[in-house]
Amino acid sequence: MGHSHTHNHSHSHNDLKGRNLFISILLNILITIAQVVGGIVSGSLALLSDALHNFSDVLSLIISYVANKLSKKKASIHRTFGYKRAEILAAFINAATLIIVAILLIIEAIKRFQNPEEIESNLVIWLSLLGIVANGFSVLLLKKDSKANMNMKSAYLHLLTDMMASVAVLIGGLLMKYYELYWVDSVLTFVIALYLIWMGFDLLKRSTKVLMLFTPDDIPLKQIVAEINAFDSIKNVHHVHVWQLNEEEIHLEAHIDFNNDITLSQFDVILHEIEYLVFNKYDINHVNIQPEFGKDDVKDVIVQD
């Protein structure tokens, strides 16, 4: 059986991610405390809902921070993959909490819309400005890493939606201050919640696919099988599995039936060619091939284990 893999790790970059997450955690704790106090004093549901969202941000950022630390731990006899899936699990948890928080906000917004209350708008305005500044800074810290890492994207989305929520609360505060439109508080809460669901669902779906070992969306499995089958020495490619372990690793596992009873050194040459093909064309960096000759087994591309 042949197996190969390629690693590209940057410890300094991981440390930077961890530092940025830690700064964001501290900022969000500050915002949450300020908004809870301000929401109670002012009577603003939008401000309290923003505080609840901020609190979920704190939890999600802590989960992301812990997952980032765990992902760097080495593999062992009992954990042969180490904690490489920690960040994917964190993304799944964060996406799920984002949706749950949004549903709770919708329920509260409907209740408040039916019974609008007068709100101390000045406090709402100043605390929403604090949220915009602090969350805006956190968003900038995590933006770069969010493009390539699902865990960091989940944290980034929490912060981005929170910044947008603070902008909405600011607009609501201004409308309440100058026009006494107190029902705006509930409407903005409802809109914020719908946006949270929309953003969270896509991330929940993506992280679920990874956890369920589904073939990545951008991997054309039939095409890869056809290209490997085109090798002169190969009779059949079957029992194929392709899955994503984490953000950096995509695995390909397959049984290959050869036309001739080749030597191990000949197999190594062919294996190298397959590795080169799938890595350069499809970014698959872990290849595990089981060579066969005349073996009586199921020759279907996909076989249920």
Image: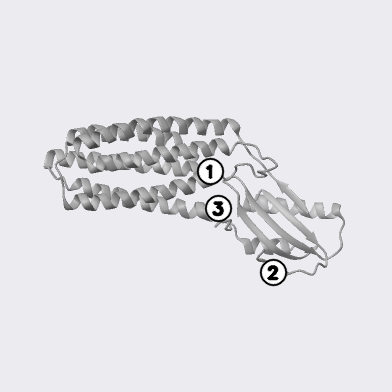
- Give the number of the disc on residue 211: 3
Q: Is residue 274 left or right of residue 60?
A: right
**Cα separation between marks 1 and 2:** 34 Å
- Judging from the image, what secondary structure is the residue with disc 2 in? loop
Instruction: Give the class, few, some or many, for how many residues have Cα within 10 Å of label 2's Cα (few <14, many ≥20).
Output: few
Q: Say which amino acid is labelled 1.
A: Glu
- Judging from the image, what secondary structure is the residue with disc 3 in? helix
Say which of marks 1 and 2 sits in front: 1
Q: Say which amino acid is labelled 3.
A: Leu
Q: Say which amino acid is labelled 2.
A: Asp
The quadrant of the rendering that contains the C terminus is: bottom right
- Which residue in the protein does label 2 denote? 300
Instruction: Give the class, few, some or many, for how many residues have Cα within 10 Å of label 3's Cα (few <14, many ≥20).
Output: some
User: Could you tell me residue 69's position as x and y percent?
Assistant: 55, 35
Q: Is residue 108 left or right of residue 253?
A: left
Q: Residue placed at 39% from the left, 47% from the top?
A: 98
- Give the number of the disc on residue 96: none
The quadrant of the rendering that contains the N terminus is: bottom right
Q: Residue placed at 34% from the left, 42% from the top?
A: 53
Say which of marks 3 and 2 sits in front: 3
